[in-house]
Structure formats: C-alpha cells, structure tokens
Image (tube, rainbow, N blue to C red):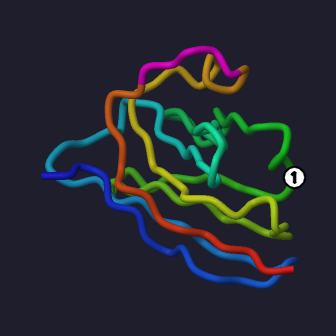
Amino acid sequence: QVPLVESGGGLVQAGGSLRLSCAASGRTFSSDYMGWFRQAPGKEREFVAAIGISASDTHYADSVKGRFTISRDNVKNTVYLQVNSLKPEDTAVYYCAARFDPRSARIGAQTFVHYWGQGTQVTVSS
C-alpha cells in the first residue's frame, strides 16, 4: 500500500495556478517533515518545498520561493502545495515525500527520503 497519494496536477497555461494535494494513509506523519520534490524530463529529481510540525517551519527552493506555498492539515493527514505564477520550466512530475531532512534537501545534498508518493504531472504551456 502506497502511504502517500498525490492529486491536483494537470495542464495549465503560464501564469496559472494549481493546488497539489498529498494524502497519507496507513500511517501518520504529523511528527515528520513532509514536502515536495519534482523531476523534469531528462533532469534529476529536485527539492521544491518542505514543512515541519509547525506551520511556520517551511523550506523552499530558491526557484519557487514567493510563488509556491506549502501547508499541511494534520487532522486530514494531508500536505498541500499551492503553485502560482507557473512557468514552463515548472513542468515536471511532482512527488510527495515524507520523513526527510529539508535542510540537506534544499542545498542539493544527498538526502534519504523515507516515503515517496507516485507523483502527479504538472505541465505548463507557454
């Protein structure tokens, strides 16, 4: 059973918005960092955003800061990524992740992620 299931991806024009959701099942991640990574065709998977236990404990990649907002609802065991002002270069498969070190992920250091979702495609047309 996949503990993380993403939804909300799709095709959107540049400048548009989407709200990605990641629902956890089978276990709770309320004490763990949760977040999002993305992988564009031909590129390595990269860190996008993470959120800790506190709503104010957030981390963002420089490329998305100011445009993306991560949040979580521990009652629903769900993490969200509001993506605004989308650009064609944001096109990628977006993966939900749980239980990892966001500080090392943010700087591109090797980071072990305990749980991955299966991904949701975001395509931004110019």
Dominant SS of magenta comes to: loop
Please, is residue 72 above or below residue 27 in the view? below
Image quadrant holding the C terminus, namely bottom right
Q: Secondary structure at mark 1?
A: loop
Q: Position of residue 84 (x, y in %)?
A: 79, 69
> Residue furthest toward the front?
42
- Report which residue position mark 1 lands on: 66
Whether residue 80 is in magenta: the answer is no
**Quarter holding residue 11:** bottom right
The residue depicted at 20 percent of the width and 52 percent of the height is: 2
The residue depicted at 43 percent of the width and 41 percent of the height is: 97
Please, is residue 2 above or below residue 23 in the view? above
Q: Position of residue 4 (x, y in %)?
A: 31, 52
Give the mark count.
Answer: 1
The residue depicted at 54 percent of the width and 74 percent of the height is: 9
In front here: 77 or 42?
42
Please, is residue 5 above or below residue 11 in the view? above
Q: Is residue 93 left or right of residue 112?
A: right
In front here: 34 or 110?
110
**Quarter holding residue 87:** bottom right
Q: Is residue 2 left or right of residue 123?
A: left
Q: Position of residue 89 (x, y in %)?
A: 81, 59
- Per the rendered image, the range of residues in magenta is 108-112
Q: Amino acid at mark 1?
A: Gly
Q: Residues within 10 Å of mark 1 (few under 14, many from 20)?
A: few
**Quarter holding residue 43:** top right
Q: Position of residue 93 (x, y in %)?
A: 55, 59
